[in-house]
Image: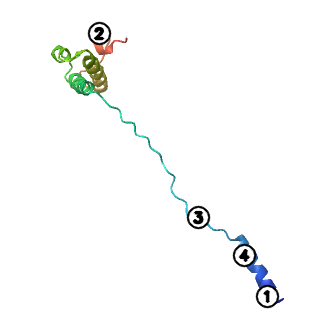
């Protein structure tokens, strides 16, 4: 038994120094997607505003605006303004200045 004692000690020493590595998983990325419900009138207004900006038309069509009821009219005009301001930036002849309704601050 005494001659096995050094081997047992060496085995314990080596096993004590050994570490077990656990494979690291990639960091988990949590993404939160926020879905905003946009009123159809606001979406239509956004599309029309962008189209009008490219055509250098500075106001929405009165016929389209008047076709909506009060609530949808406000949504359409909000969308039109967003679309106009989004698409007017950097486009050739279309520049916002203070004389245009979209260039006036409220």
> Disc 1 vs disc 2: which is toward the camera?
1
Q: Nearer the viewer, residue 51 or 93?
A: 51
Q: Residue tagged by mark 2?
A: 99
Q: Give the numbered dot on residue 4.
A: 1
Residue 6 percent across, percent down from the top left: 80, 84
Which mark sits nearer the N-terminus, 4 or 3? Answer: 4
Which mark sits nearer the N-terminus, 4 or 2? Answer: 4
Q: CA distance from mark 1 to mark 3?
A: 33 Å
Q: Residue tagged by mark 4?
A: 14
Farthest residue in the right direction?
2
Residue 3 vertical position relative to residue 38 in the rendered view, above or below:
below
Residue 91 vertical position relative to residue 58 in the rendered view, above or below:
below
Residue shown at 76%/80% (left/top)? 10
Residue 23 percent across, percent down from the top left: 55, 63
Which mark sits nearer the N-terminus, 1 or 3? Answer: 1
Q: CA distance from mark 1 to mark 4?
A: 16 Å
Q: Give the numbered dot on residue 20.
A: none
Q: Quadrant of the N terminus?
A: bottom right
Q: CA distance from mark 4 to mark 3?
A: 19 Å
Q: Is residue 1 left or right of residue 25?
A: right
Which mark sits nearer the N-terminus, 3 or 2? Answer: 3
Which mark sits nearer the N-terminus, 1 or 4? Answer: 1
Residue 27 vertical position relative to residue 54 in the rendered view, above or below:
below
Residue 5 percent across, percent down from the top left: 81, 85
Q: Is residue 43 left or right of residue 63?
A: right
């Amino acid at each position: 038994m005494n001659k096995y004692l050094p081997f047992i000690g060496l085995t314990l020493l080596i096993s004590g120094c050994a570490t077990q590595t656990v494979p690291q998983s990639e960091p988990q990325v949590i993404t939160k997607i926020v879905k905003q419900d946009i009123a159809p009138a606001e979406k239509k207004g956004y599309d029309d505003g962008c189209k009008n900006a490219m055509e250098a038309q500075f106001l929405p069509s009165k016929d389209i605006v008047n076709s909506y009821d009060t609530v949808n009219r406000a949504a359409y005009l909000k969308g039109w303004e967003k679309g106009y301001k989004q698409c007017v930036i950097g486009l050739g002849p279309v520049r916002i200045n203070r004389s245009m309704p979209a260039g006036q601050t409220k």
